[in-house]
Amino acid sequence: MKRRIAAMIMIALLVVPTVVLAASVGYGARGDDVIKIQKALKKWGYYSGSVDGIFGSGTLAAVKSFQKKNGLKADGVVGPATAAKMGITLSSGSSSGTTTGDVYLLARIIYGEARGEPYKGQVAIGAVVLNRVKSASFPNTIAGVIYQRGAFDAVSDGQINLAPDATAVRAARDALNGWDPTNGCLFYYNPKTATSRWMLARPVLLRIGNHAFC
Amino acid sequence: MNKKVKILAWTVPALLCVALAAAVVWGAAQKARADEMSALSEEYVALYVNSCARCAQELADSVDAMSVSLEKLKATGSTAGRVFALEDIVRESAEAEKLISRIPQSQVESMELAAFLTRIGDWARSLSRRLLMGEAIGEKDTAQLDSLIASVSLVAERFSSMAAEGGFPSGTEEYDYYDVSDKNEEGGEPSEPEYPTLLYDGPFSEAVERAEPLGVTGEEGSEDEAKRKAEEIVGAPVSFDGRTEGTIPTYDFSAEGADISITVRGLNVLYFMKTPSTDISGIPDEAEYEGFVAAGEAFLRKLGYDSMAPSYAEFTDGTALISYVWKRGEVFVYNDLVKVRIDRATGEPVGLDARNYLFSHRERTFPEPTLSEDEARSAVSENLVIESSGLALIPVTPMTEALCYEFRGRCGSREFVVYVNAVTGREERVFMVIEDENGKSAV
């Protein structure tokens, strides 16, 4: 038992907030800016890896070679000058920084909980999180809802820390834009694995893929 | 003895010795690592248990403080004094709400209490706003305050003794987030509400939770009719996925890469979402943008929305997402909002969200402005350089709307939209327009 708690706390401590506030993006960064950079590099033929939103060694090498070819200092850090040459604008540093963080956090819970589910089912997970934020009975921030202890399996087992794919990011954005396929649901469960009698007694409003929403 | 055998006779034991030594070194390293990990684990457990204890104590303290502030509010005679007390209540409620969700316990069990603690702050904010707008405290408010004082002092007492006697969970117990005691097991909600209902107008109020979709009218349609409508919009055969119950019951259909929900009553499109054909990003030029706006308007006309005007737009994931608001004469009605998504490569509609419109659209009586635009202008901060203006019906609280003059302008490098009530002359809302690579939005 003790070990389980310890493991849980360690995971909690390893979760580093993903809001990037610096006006430049470099090795180790994650988020929408990195996705933008990877897409631009891919478009210009410098990068052949996956557009996963993680600034790893592949992205680093691609940025360096882009900078070298374009007469920039090849430091592997995408600042305003490199971003301008790539034809992109970084959201970091501007006032939309927190919004980017919300999209990415929501995308991670969607990916952790529902990758492999139909697209609508992925948006639905984001919608349930946002319905909880709006509800008086739950914490009033996205992070508060997601990290409430025991609320989501993907948080308890660390899957929330996987890098989300482009689909999950798009689903997060759709949910934030107001798409709610669940019609206001606050809960969902997998009927094959759920055990909570309270949950199973609630009226189900709809089913999408492996999840029942209530 | 054979030479080969001789070599083997000493190399085999030697190799075994080396292997043994390596195993011992490796084992010792593993042992040290395990010790380190277990020391670390103990440290983390202690850290967590302490943070739970801190939460419990702070929760008890904040509810206790809230109880005092409520009593003070009752004994205060001046508006300024009341607003100060209400501000304290707002802060204490936010604190308590945050802490209760961190106590390691079944959140399903404490949902009702969490909602009550949140609503006290929401109620206080709404009352404080009314007092600042010149309203007097009424009999209903006093009655509400009395019932609040009674139930908050009970919660405060319970928490104080729990904190003193170690009644809060310490963090080492195993528990299930979705677990409930036997009394709450059937059907979710307990039958007797433990806390008083707060009647007020705020974002977390029960009135908002129970709001009816005013724009969903007309007869119930059949699944077949809904399917025909869905296929017309998706432009391909769709299959029926089932009905969604809830506030706006819908028939749900899907096709490859497309989902659509049609309301059971009135057969309106609630949602339509199709995978875009491109991932073009960045803000388009004016001519391209006008094309998207026209495409969106044509789509809305086809669905029966006649008088819609574009407001904000966002450009992500290969689409232009344009918000259209209902326009009655010269007045923009911001609550009656429909979002349309246009594919940037094909110019085709690939999405629609009419939830806001279907919740709020209805026949309204519009007040006549009693102020001229110039008179209203004097209520706007002199720091704002006004660039354009118009009339709009905006939500001032979740349940009420007001006719306002809308002034768009700049304060330094920032763009703002300021709303001045066209009847009372009061400055109702101030929004800052945020512009990023995805477009503009107001916060």
Image (tube, rainbow, N blue to C red):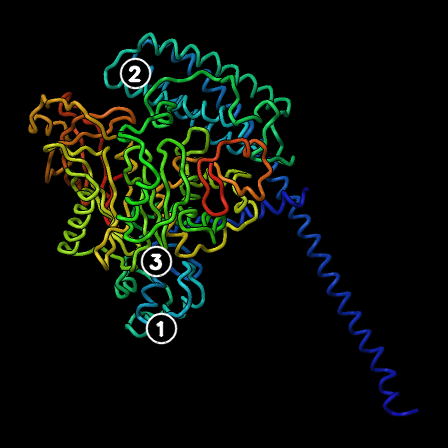
Mark 3 belongs to which amino acid? Ser
Q: Position of residue B293 (x, y in %)?
A: 17, 49
Residue sitting at 36 percent across and 17 percent down?
Answer: B199
For the C terminus of chain B, the image quarter is top left
Residue sitting at 19 percent across and 39 percent down?
Answer: B304
Question: Which element carries disc 3, helix, strand or loop?
Answer: loop
Q: Which residue is mark 2?
A: B80
Furthest residue toward right: B1
Q: Position of residue B388 (x, y in %)?
A: 10, 39
The answer to which quarter of the image holds residue B13 is bottom right
Instruction: Choose the circle earlier in sequence order: 1 or 3.
Output: 3
Mark 1 belongs to which amino acid? Ser
Q: Which residue is mark 3?
A: A24
Q: Nearer the viewer, mark 1 or mark 3?
A: 1
Mark 2–mark 1 Cα distance, whole angstroms, equals 64 Å
Q: Nearer the viewer, mark 2 or mark 1?
A: 1
Q: Which residue is mark 1?
A: A65
Q: Position of residue A199 (x, y in %)?
A: 54, 34
